[in-house]
Amino acid sequence: MQKTRPGGPKPWAPLSDPLGIRSACHRGGKYERRAPHPGGPGPHLSASLRKPVKPKAKSLSTATTSPSPSSSTLLLLLVSSEVADDDDDEVSPMTTREVPLLLLLVVVMVLAGAGAARGFYLPGVAPRDFRKKDQLAVKVNQLSSIKTQLPYSYYSLPFCRPATIVDSAENLGEVLRGDRIENSLYVFEMREPRLCQIVCKTALTHQEAKDFREKIDDEYRINMILDNLPLVVPIRSLLDDHDAPTSYQLGVHVGIKGQYAGSNEEKHFIYNHLSFLVKYHKDENTDLARIVGFEVKPFSTKHEYDGEWKENETRLKTCDPHSRRLVVDSDSPQEVEAGKEIIFTYDVNFEESDIKWASRWDSYLLMTDDQIHWFSIVNSLMIVLFLSGMLAMIMLRTLYRDISKYNQLETQEEAQEETGWKLVHGDVFRPPARAGTLCVFVGTGVQFLGMLLVTLLFAILGLLSPSNRGGLMTAMLLVWAFMGVLAGYAAARLYRGFRGSEWKAVAMRTALAFPGAAFAVFFVLNALIWGERSSGAVPFTTMTALVLLWFGISVPLVFVGSYLGFKRPAATEDYPVRTNKIPRPIPEQPWYMNPAMSVLIGGILPFGAVFIELFFILTSIWLHQFYYIFGFLFLVFAILVVTCAEIAVVLCYFQLCGEDYEWWWRSYLTAGSSALYLFLYAAFYFFTKLDITKVVSGVLYFGYMLIASAAFFVLTGTIGFYACFWFTRLIYSSVKID
C-alpha cells in the first residue's frame, strides 16, 4: 500500500479516533480539532486508510459509587419521634422551625445508613501500594457508544476471554449505568515492561464478523480499569503549544472504518494490538509505588508467523522484540473478515510520574471552559437582580403605600371603595380545586428539593468522588427514599390547612403517584433495552432492589411524615384572614394576565438561569464526559431557587391586583412551566448535538428526559408555590380587616 497523505501537510489525529483522521473534544458546545499524541500511530494509519469524516465529541465519562443503607433502626427512631405543639395558632405547609430538624434527621439517617454498609465516604478510597513485579490485573467494563447509548458486555464480542469469567461486585448505580466489570487476560507485572505479548488467536465466524462490523459502525469503545483508574487515550491540541494540557478520551475504539489508498471500497479494521502505558508515583523512602495513570495507543496490524501455531511458543514475524521489530504503526491493518485469523497482542510500558496518588484524577477532571460557567452565573445573577429590583419596588412602594392607606381611619368623606388585592381578602385563602392533588405535587417537590440539597452538599464536601463509580446515582436514590418523610410531612401540613380529613389518601398518592409514573416509563424503556440484548438492561434482582427501596423505605417514611404533619392541632383561624362563605366573582382579566399566558411567561426566566449548565449536564450524560463541577452547579441551583421564587411572587401580586384570587395552582404552574422549556431544549439538543442513529436509542433519550423534566416541574413548581404562600400570608397579615 502506498503511503500518501491526502489534503496536504496537516496535523493528524491519533489512531484512537474512530474515523482515522480527526479527533474532537467538546468545548462549550463547539468542537475543536485535536492534534495527535507525539509518537502516536495516526500518521501511519492514515497512510494506509483514509476516510472523509465529520468531527464529533468524544470525551470522558464517569460516575461515583455509594453504599446501600440499612434503615430498620432509623425507621424506629423516626416513628418514635414526637412533633407536637398544642399551642400552635395556625397551620402552615411547613414551619421554619420544623424544616431544619427534619432535614437534619434525614441527613443523619443517610449518613448512618451509608456507614452501616461501606465506609468509603469518610475518608475515601484507600490507595494501593505495589512492589516491583506485583501482579496488576486489568478489568474490562462495558462497550459504550454515544451513537446508540446501548452498552454491551465486553465479552459480547469474541475477544480473548479467560477460562472463568468473574464478575466484580457492583453497586446500584453501576448496574443502572450498564457497567459490567469482569476479569480479563490482560495481566501485568508492576514496573516490568513487556513487548509483543500474545493474548490469543481466533478466527471469526460470519456472525462474529458481522457483530464486529456493527460495533465499529456504531463507534463502540472498549472500557478497561486498572487500580480503579479508567483506560484513556491521550489527545493533544492541534495548536503548536507544547504547554497545552493533554485531554483524554475514555476507552479505546473497537476498530475503525476506512479505505485503502487508491480504493473507494470501505473496509472495517479491528484494533488488535494495544500499547499500554502505566504511570506510577514512587515513594522516595521505599520501593513501593502507586498507579497514577493508565493510557493506551491502539494499532491495527495483520500479524504473521512462520510454521504451525503453538501456544506460548510461536514467535510473531510482525512483532518480535528480539529482532527489534515492534508494532509502531498500522501500515498493514487487520481487516475484519469471516474465517481469517486475528491475533490479539499488547505491549505494556511503565513511566514514573511526579503526579501524586491524591491528584491522579486532576488531569481527567481538567476543566477548560470555566469562563462559560462564570458567564452563565453572571448572566443569571443579572436576571435575579432585575427580579429583585422589581420585587423591591412592589414591597417598598406599592405594597407599603397600600397598607398605609388601608390602615388609616377614613372619614366618611374620604371613604372609597376597596380595590386591588385587599378586595379579595375574603377569598384569597379559599381552598383551590383539587386541593389534594396540589398537596401531592407539593410534597413530591419537597422530596426532590431535599434530595438535591443533600446530594449537592455531599458532592461539594467531596464525599462523592469520581473514583467511586455509580456513587452519585446510588446516593441520589438513597437520599430520595429517605426524603419521603419530608414529602409526607409537607403534603399533610398543607392538606390540614385546606381542612382536609383524608390524610392517608393524600399520603398514599404522595408515595405512589410520581414514583409510580416514573417507574412505569422506566419499565417500558428497560424492556426496549432487553430487546436489544444490551447490558444496560436492569436485571430482575436490581429491579427488585429498587422496588424494595421504594416500598420498604420511601413509602413508610411518607406515611410517618404525613402522620407527624397531620397530627399538629389547628386553631380556628389558620390564616390571617377569614374566608367568605360565598366566592367572589372574578372580573375579566386583560390578555396579558390570561392564565396560560402568564404561566408560559413565568417559566422563561427560571429556565434561562439554568440552560447553560443544563447543556454541560446533557453533554456529560449523553456524550460520556466528566461532570465534576458541583460548586458551579450549587451556585446555579441557588440562583434557580431565587429566580423561581421571585418570578412567582411578582406574577402572583399582579394577579391579586387584578382581583383574581385563584393563585394556588397558578403559583405552582408559573415556576413549574420552566420544565416545558427544559424538555423543548432537550429535543433541540437531540437533533443538533447528538448523532443517535437507532430508533430505540431515540426513545430512550426522550423517555429519560421526560422523567427528568417531570422532576424539574415538581421541583420548580414547589419553590414557586411556597414563595407565593409566604408572600400572601405576609401581606394579608399586615393590614386591618374588619
Image: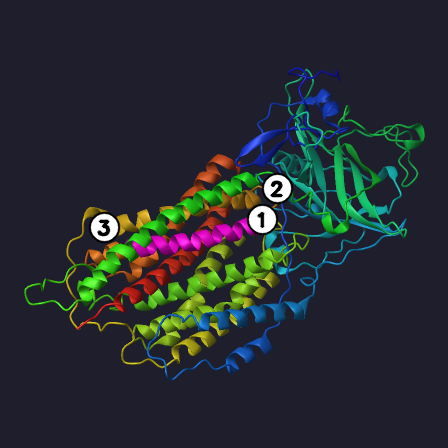
Circle number at residue 629 = 1
Between residue 562 and residue 416, name the one nearer to us: 416
Circle number at residue 367 = 2
Circle number at residue 594 = 3
Q: Which residues are magenta?
A: 628-651
Q: Residue 289: percent from the left, percent from the top?
A: 84, 50
- Looking at marks 1 and 2 on the same chain, the residue that comes earlier in the sequence is marked by 2
Horizontal relation, residue 351 to residue 471: left or right: right
**Disc 2 element:** loop
Kind of residue sitting beneath label 3 = Asn
Horizontal relation, residue 84 to residue 541: left or right: left
Q: Residues within 10 Å of mark 1 (few under 14, many from 20)?
A: some
Horizontal relation, residue 173 to residue 101: left or right: right
Placement of the C terminus among the 4 image quadrants: bottom left
Q: Is residue 728 visible?
A: yes
- Magenta stretch, overall SS: helix
Relative to 405, residue 630 above or below: above
Of labels 3 and 1, the one closer to you: 1
- Looking at marks 3 and 1 on the same chain, the residue that comes earlier in the sequence is marked by 3
Of labels 3 and 2, the one closer to you: 2
